[in-house]
Image (cartoon, rainbow, N blue to C red):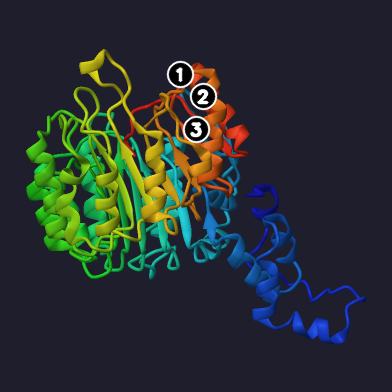
């Protein structure tokens, strides 16, 4: 965001219409029609939109609506009230450079009324006097339930100082549709801070939420907080379709309770408690609970990292999801160390294709290592990708699967059918053991998916470089990343 240009603007301008004389009269008249002008302004950069906002009152109103529609960081907005500077006392914080003459509250409020998408950083990034000064200004402005009446999407990062900005600036309007809270559970009084935030949100109240994401690095199981969470969901039970409960480790009774509150969910993500070992029967019961509670699901993301599912077929684990007939996206991460489930077979994939014929994304994350076999990483045979193309050739866009690249490798000349829409292949922690296998693997992938595809690998060192060579041979966009435990 071009703060140095945008922050100097006033909400309206007294400058009269100034259009280059080379334009014909009809063109000039067309630029006075809001719909036509808006269709042009949306293609401009933020800097050019800021220049357009100085042309006339009409241009200013439309351009400023676009400029302030999405605010990637709330300090850009606060900067319009009074200039901020990054300074250090005992910590680096944002503070006002000079507030002695007061700020431009009318300008700030005019821009805030235009914001539709906003991200609020951690409160600890701002000096306490900044927050208290804004709070005093807000308290003097009565008659508004929120300074952001058009806000539809809010992302909050909640840290040690608590959600003061949320209250000080009345960030949350009743019409909010998307709420994402990233909660850092690393400080004293963390649960109290989270409880205060949930209580504040419930008091708004929020009746139109379609997306709720409550994520973080901790595991919240306090009964009072669970009650506040359920109250938040209850307010939007008729509109909520996307739910991420990663902050609250899910139990089977919890799944049933959430299913009774918001039965029409289409997108569900949840984690099992890291410190609890899930047996095969408990994993099956958990996914059966999902199938019984959420019949309208189109996307499921589940991580039960502490599960032990030795020699269990994936088709047995997810059979309970059969009642979710509209599923299009699977993201299954069950288990980490110990004996893995049985590797995928052609029969498993045919079963999946027969139950869910329109799958767009299939991510199956095995354990990183098989301790029974000396820590060797396991994967499904590379040739099995052909079976995925057979059942989902026209729909599959994303496939994540650990693959086994040990010879014999599949013959590219016999590859049929092919993926028509595949955009990304995530090979996880798969290894390529021999340099001479790189070219045959690339030939097979090229034959399997003729279009452009991104290849992701979570390996490190030489294994990562080898998948990078495969990517260059198939002219793919390769993304190599060091392995980190998946919590998202």
Q: Residue at x 25, y 21 (%)?
A: 370
- For marks 3 and 1, give the CA distance: 49 Å
Residue drawn where x is 23% and y is 23% of the image: 337
Q: Quadrant of the C terminus?
A: top left
* Image depth: mark 3 or mark 2 in front: 2
Identify residue for label 1: 433
Helix, strand or loop status at disc 2: helix
Kindly indicate whether the residue at mark 1 contacts the one at mark 2 (C-beta within 8 angstroms). yes
Q: Position of residue 331 (x, y in %)?
A: 31, 45
Instruction: Say which element carries label 1.
Output: loop
Query: Does the image show residue 351?
Result: yes
Residue 375's quadrant in the figure? top left
Q: How many marks?
A: 3
Name the disc covering residue 93, or none.
3
Residue 462 location (% of width, % of height)? 51, 17
Q: According to the image, label 2 marks what residue? A: 437
Q: CA distance from mark 3 to mark 2?
A: 53 Å
């Amino acid at each position: 965001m071009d703060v140095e240009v945008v922050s100097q603007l006033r909400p309206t301008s007294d400058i009269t219409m100034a259009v280059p004389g080379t334009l014909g009269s009809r063109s000039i008249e067309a630029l006075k029609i809001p719909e036509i002008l808006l269709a042009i302004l949306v293609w401009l950069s933020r800097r050019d939109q800021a220049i357009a906002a100085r042309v006339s009152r009409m241009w200013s109103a439309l351009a400023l609506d676009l400029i302030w529609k999405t605010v990637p960081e709330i300090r850009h907005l606060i900067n319009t009230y009074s200039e901020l500077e990054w300074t250090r006392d005992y910590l680096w914080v944002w503070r006002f450079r000079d507030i002695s003459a007061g700020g431009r509250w009318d300008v700030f409020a005019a821009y805030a009324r235009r914001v539709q998408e906003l991200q609020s950083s951690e409160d600890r990034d701002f000096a306490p006097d900044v927050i208290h000064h804004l709070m005093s200004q807000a308290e003097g402005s009565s008659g508004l339930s929120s300074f952001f009446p058009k806000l539809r999407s809010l992302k909050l990062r909640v840290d040690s100082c608590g959600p003061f900005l949320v209250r000080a600036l009345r960030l949350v309007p009743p019409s909010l549709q998307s709420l994402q809270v990233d909660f850092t559970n690393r400080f004293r009084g963390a649960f109290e801070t989270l409880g205060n935030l949930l209580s504040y949100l419930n008091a708004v109240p929020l009746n139109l939420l379609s997306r709720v994401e409550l994520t973080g690095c901790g595991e919240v199981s306090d009964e009072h907080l669970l009650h506040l969470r359920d109250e938040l969901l209850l307010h939007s039970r008729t509109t909520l379709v996307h739910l991420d409960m990663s902050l609250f480790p899910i139990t089977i009774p919890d799944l049933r309770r959430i299913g009774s509150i918001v039965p029409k969910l289409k997108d569900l993500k949840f984690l099992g408690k890291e410190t609890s070992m899930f047996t095969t029967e408990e994993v099956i019961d958990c996914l059966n609970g999902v199938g019984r509670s959420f019949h309208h699901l189109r996307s499921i993301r589940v991580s039960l990292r502490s599960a032990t599912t030795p020699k269990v077929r994936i088709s047995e684990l997810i059979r309970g999801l059969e009642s979710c007939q509209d599923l299009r996206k699977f993201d299954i991460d069950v288990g980490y160390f110990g004996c893995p489930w049985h590797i995928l077979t052609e029969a498993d994939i045919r079963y999946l294709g027969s139950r869910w014929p329109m799958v767009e994304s299939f991510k199956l994350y095995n354990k990183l290592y098989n301790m029974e076999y000396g820590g060797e990483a396991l994967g499904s045979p590379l040739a099995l990708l052909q079976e995925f193309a057979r059942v989902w050739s026209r729909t599959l866009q994303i496939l994540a699967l650990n693959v086994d690249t040990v010879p014999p490798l599949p013959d590219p000349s016999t590859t049929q059918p092919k993926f028509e829409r595949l955009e990304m292949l995530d090979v996880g922690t798969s290894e390529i053991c021999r340099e001479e296998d790189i070219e045959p693997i690339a030939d097979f992938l090229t034959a399997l998916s003729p279009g452009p595809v991104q290849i992701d690998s979570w390996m490190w060192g030489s294994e990562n470089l080898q998948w990078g060579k495969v990517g260059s041979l198939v002219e793919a966009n390769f993304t190599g990343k060091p392995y980190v435990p998946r919590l998202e």
